[in-house]
Image: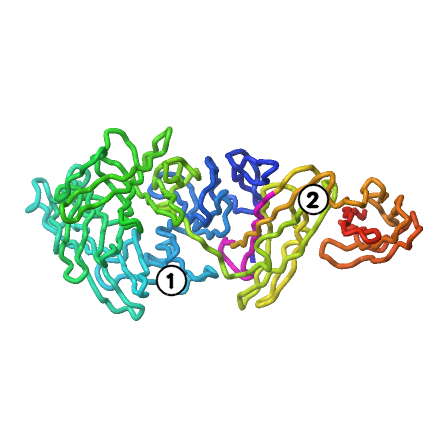
Amino acid sequence: MRIFRPCISILFFIAVFQGLPTLASAQQLQGLPEDFPEIQLNVYDEPEPGYVFMTPSGLWGYFEGVTPYLAILDNYGTPVYYRELSNAAFDFKLQPNGELSFHGGGLGFVNHIVDSTYHIVDAISVSGYNGTDFHEFKILDNGNYLLLGWDHRVVDMDTVVPGGHPGVTVGGTLIQEKNTAGNILWEWSSWDHFEILECDTAHVDLTNPNFIDYVHTNAIEVDADGNILISNRNMHEVTKIEKGTGELIWRMGGSQNEFTFIGDDTDGFSGQHDIRRLENGNYMLFDNGWFHPEHVSSALEFQIDEINKTMTVVKRYRSQPNDIWGGIMGSAQRLPGGNTLVGWGSGVPNVTEFKPDGSKALEFEFESVSYRAFKFQWKTSIFTLSDEEIDFGEIYFEDLDYKTISLTNSLDEDIIITWMHQHNDKYSISTNLPLTISAGSTENITILFNPEEIGEYNDILTIYGERADQEIISAFAQQLVVSGSASQEASVGDLNANEIWVYPNPTDGTLKINRSSIDEAKIKLTNTHGQMVYSSVIPSGTHSWDIDISNEKSGIYILKIQEGTSTQTIIRKIIKK
């Protein structure tokens, strides 16, 4: 078992009365591995709910010395899952069946399927040929797998282009649909439909004596009619394939373009990634923008008239006021609420969420690259919380309140709750960590609310755990939404807080209660685990009362006093020295 406590910055600006970060500024996030990327939150303006899936790494020399990770972040850049890898991973996402998948990561050049406990439960690859491509892997609604692979063939390029060499390996595209039994149900190869000279000869060196990548397919999508869309970067082409016969239905972009680009924006796309069919009937892709007059990348939404072969741009999502250039990689995802999440690939900032009007709802920046970025609703099943939201209500600003929640381990192995991250100091956890939760067992932790200042305080607490016997650097988390407010009037009502004095505080033994009222009063003293330490009734007519806690452990205790028939309760934090 390894438990990590190093320090790393996640940049936040604390909005005191809201309790959550809104813009980038410095705050330490304790507990992450030292080499986990530092996430800078540039924009936070009502993003859609969900978690951002990324695979930060150095990749092809863009950043030196970057440790690859799988990472799932909340909208503030706080990770709820990370796993260190030995090599870069790709295409980390949620599949329609509720499982996760990613490619590579030093665990083999295959697509790994991951369950809700972050265990790798299967590995899927193409059958035959030259290997499984990292760019795309889809689990279809019927449970079948749609896979991208390499169909490399040796070609005498001296017969194709002047200056070409004999016996050169040329990379082609392979697509396979397989069922869960591993049977190939459908197969398609670019060699049956594309010519080598149809590629972008300005970017693809056809005189290379070693390897030529003439298609470079980087996305597969099932269209609404069940046929297949693919994005071919080195041809600057989106192609539609008839699923039954494998014949080409149409070709858009590149040297074999069949479409007329109409409307105000006829710039088209180039070096593109991530073709997707949208629920509104439009299409979207990430336009890397190789051929634009300036280096500008964008998420491009467009309409297609398949009969008249026209393409009309609906909207380009560009980073304003400063454009971003993502020369390679990248993704564009339409979110359920209508926002669009863009992963800029090699561009920085790295991830932007746009509202429908083109303004930014969210933006992350970090010193690494991620092949794609996605946002999904997601929650691990490793452990569960008895409450997902806690409202402390309104309390007197000098009071302290606490609530206990239960954590249940769903695994057949022990887990260890290691630490908790909060965005401000009004909320804390009093339970001693690390806390081991045995397989299938439940343990309690106590959340403290200690405002000390007048205001409203909302926060998201991230509770981290690790597997007890893990050997890799990895952690998972659940999040707890908390809220509360503090004022001078709260908890007083007909019980005037200024008429009760509790002293000395801190105390090393005897705690004295003096009060002006002569009503009967109920008093309770508990520790921060909710365990009763002292309980009694002050008789009517009694102004003074002593509590002996000399035999109790040092720490924080909670004193509650309720007088007469009052429904209001005075709460005081007591410190035992």
Q: Residues within 10 Å of mark 2 (few under 14, many from 20)?
A: many
Question: Label 2, label 1: how many angstroms apart (C-alpha)?
Answer: 42 Å
Report which quarter residue 500 is drawn in. top right
Q: Residues within 10 Å of mark 1 (few under 14, many from 20)?
A: few
Give the residue displayed 22% in from the left and 55% down from the top. 228
Mark 2 or 1, nearer chain start:
1
Q: Which mark is residue 35?
A: none
| Residue receiving disc 2 | 450
Report which quarter residue 199 is drawn in. top left
Above-or-below relation of 417 to 234:
below
Query: Which three-letter amino acid code belongs to the residue tagged 2?
Result: Asn
| Secondary element at image label 1 | loop
Q: Which mark is residue 97?
A: 1
Residue 443 coordinates in the image, percent (x, y): 64, 62
Report which quarter residue 326 is drawn in. top left
Magenta span: 458-475
The secondary structure that dominates the magenta segment is strand
Q: Indicate yes or no whether the magenta region holds residue 465.
A: yes
Query: Which three-letter amino acid code belongs to the residue tagged 1?
Result: Asn
| Secondary element at image label 2 | loop
Q: Left of 523 or right of it: where is 203?
A: left
Residue 188 coordinates in the image, percent (x, y): 18, 59
Q: Indicate yes or no whether the magenta region holds residue 128.
A: no
Q: Quadrant of the N terminus?
A: bottom right
